[in-house]
Image: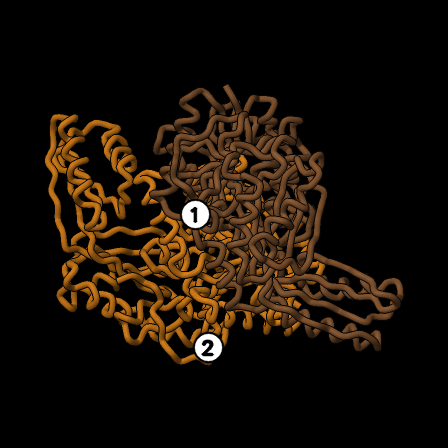
Chain colours: A brown, B orange
Amino acid sequence: MARLVHKFGGSSVGDIRKMRRCASRVAGVIADGNEVAVVVSAMGDTTDELIDLAGQVTSEPDRRELDALMATGEQVSAALFAMCLRELGLRGRSFTGAQAGIETDSRYGRARIKAIDGTRLEEALAGGLVPVVAGFQGRAEEGGVATLGRGGSDTTAVALGAALQVARHGGSCEIFTDVDGVFTADPRHVPDAVRLPRISYGEMLELASLGAGVMHARAVVFGERHGVPIHVRHSQHHGVGTMIVKESPEMEDNVVVGCALKTDLGRVTLRKLPATTGIQASLFDRLATGAVVVDDIIQTEFGDAASVAFTVEHGDLGAVKALANDVIGQWGQGEVCIDVGLAKVSVVGVGMRSHAGVASRMFRALSDVNIRIHNITTSEIKISCIIDRSEAERALRTVHEAFGLSELGNMAGIASGGNPSVQPSGTTG
Amino acid sequence: MARLVHKFGGSSVGDIRKMRRCASRVAGVIADGNEVAVVVSAMGDTTDELIDLAGQVTSEPDRRELDALMATGEQVSAALFAMCLRELGLRGRSFTGAQAGIETDSRYGRARIKAIDGTRLEEALAGGLVPVVAGFQGRAEEGGVATLGRGGSDTTAVALGAALQVARHGGSCEIFTDVDGVFTADPRHVPDAVRLPRISYGEMLELASLGAGVMHARAVVFGERHGVPIHVRHSQHHGVGTMIVKESPEMEDNVVVGCALKTDLGRVTLRKLPATTGIQASLFDRLATGAVVVDDIIQTEFGDAASVAFTVEHGDLGAVKALANDVIGQWGQGEVCIDVGLAKVSVVGVGMRSHAGVASRMFRALSDVNIRIHNITTSEIKISCIIDRSEAERALRTVHEAFGLSELGNMAGIASGGNPSVQPSGTTG
């Protein structure tokens, strides 16, 4: 008997029919002798509808009130899901995040979980109940209901997996979503992309940061820190999905496990800047204050005049240009140059730490098909190249092939699933 | 400076535009130097929509889960209302029932308030916040969210009025609704019906039980028990409404303050019953188990064979007939007789306790216009006559005139309002 957390996302519980199907799945797992705690997101577009209501009141809703409003979406799902379980003869019992013992700080809209008192859920499980917890929320120190921000329900699920010690009870945190698992690349762009039976937390984290929407980076970090095995699976199919686990030595055999694409990027270059210290800090402070998400930062120096470049999404370019000109005006020196129509192709894998020549293999592959590289950034387990947007999908396929990623579906560890249908991995295009 | 509770019903906060208007009203009262705590119902049809979702899952939803589901409706209203207040420069702060310290028993769906810990609301008021409490709900002993059943938000408002000691702070509990106050009769049937500037708890209670939907009886009882003055007012107009207050000696000057009509009643008569004790108990136990709401009970005895009659709404007649035949079958004696097409006209007033001849004046008035009386029931401050449905509206007008009720709008105590528009009093037709 294992103890599991099952998390169902908004599209998986988008209507009562789908919700029933998810409940049946839970019932089947319990019938096999396991304990299950369920975490649910808000149904379909509920959160957007609530935000729209708030938008009718004000363009800048109070964060605490917006959280109180949004948290009801998951509470509705939890109550309905508990009813679905009861229809199947199980003793479903809904819990708000606060009732489930999830305590957060008071940073409304992006609260962090500070502690979980699992007593009530443990009691519920011991009493034969099937807890259904409203995701995405907790009780703030100050007493209100706080939401956890993007990917919040994944974080709730992984955090409950830690509190309920699913690993010690032979189980995992199962994230049911609308894809079959984590793929070596987005199958919409790379027809021979394959599902990875498993991936390390670190690799998943890099892929998530590169826009692979299967799981939110934050939940992955939480899982790694607390040693919660995370299992990403399709909510309506019965494939085996992808296990996100601790890195093990044999994982380094695979130099690269996935590649990803981010498109519609713009590059902002500030040139001929005064070569004084603190110039980067003041620039990126301003961008952060303006809520601009900076993608990669690349700095170079030529002689006396410094230069700093960074990429942002196209949608942010207008705001960035104004801010950058403003900053240069204050410094009294420098010029702003903006390039649009860029994309970023990246490869990720813990194996590249121990294998030389990964970067050169990537650059060679792109060069062989005449794709020009504008910028390069790297982390310990990731290499990214900024290229033209028009070459993006071709670059992704090229890199996927260069590292032989379509072979990874056969890798040892977990048998490949019985479901042959290929689903988008969520790597955004 | 007075302290007030303002309660806005579902139609008063049916959309954001209406909600803004209610918030402006609160802002005006606060600008005049008063303290206000707000209680809100769910927006418009929200509760029905939530019940419909549950109905898609099961025809018999678990009561605890249905409560968890329904309570979100009021929570949405509270958060949005708090945002509306913030748009007006006030520090609105939403509270769920549980957060506001409302503790109930665990009878989900029809919970009773056991205690209110007003600490958090007192702290909020002291800190310059304007609390906006989700009505209709509290924290059940067992830990879940329980709803208070029909009229629950009124009860929340009056209970908070007691906890916050509005009377001691020179204020009252203001129930904003879609009528101008309590009328001497339903203006849809009696054109010269007038708004009562004030009415006693007891009279309001009788009128509420007679189907005058302005306020739920339960909230009135709570108000009387805890000495909370209740002020019924229109949410969109600025009339002075009706104060529901403790009975005072001069109130007895008005023999009758209102009359009401209940239509579409059926009468069930059980005749030739065995004259044994316990027969009524077993009959009405069965009806209660069958969730039939019995209106009035009239029992007579002729010789050895007992007879018992009672009125129910037409919609319940089918269920009642089956139950009554079942009971008679068990007794082995008696017969069931059903009359349909009846109505009940009633007059209410604390003054009738000290004035003789009220009943005879009512019977005389009906007799003078050839309306036949089938049954009569009385309470200390109420007289009801069962008549033919076809005579109902005529009977109401006759009684209204016989007691000179159209003069009561001029009665002393509270000056008559500036709003001449006549609104239905909610006395159901």
Query: Residue B43, percent across and down?
Result: 44, 60
Label 1 near label 2: C-beta < 8 Å?
no
Which mark is on residue B346? none
Query: Residue B259, percent across and down?
Result: 31, 63
A225 shown above or below A295: above
Say which of A412 and A219 sits in front: A412
Alpha carbon of mark 2 to alpha carbon of mark 1: how far?
56 Å
The residue shown at (44%, 55%) is: A45
Which mark is on residue A11? 1
The residue shown at (71%, 38%) is: A356
Question: Where does label 2 land, which residue?
Answer: B416
Say which of A402 and B293 sits in front: A402
The residue shown at (61%, 45%) is: A347
Say which of B39 and B327 sits in front: B39
Give the label, 2 or 1, closer to the camera. 1
Amino acid carrying label 1: it is Ser
What chain is tagged by disc 2?
B
What chain is tagged by disc 1?
A
User: Can residue B10 be seen at all in this image of the molecule?
Assistant: yes
Q: Would you call the spot at circle 1 few (<14 residues within 10 Å), some (14-19), or many (20 or more)?
A: some
Secondary structure under badge 1? loop
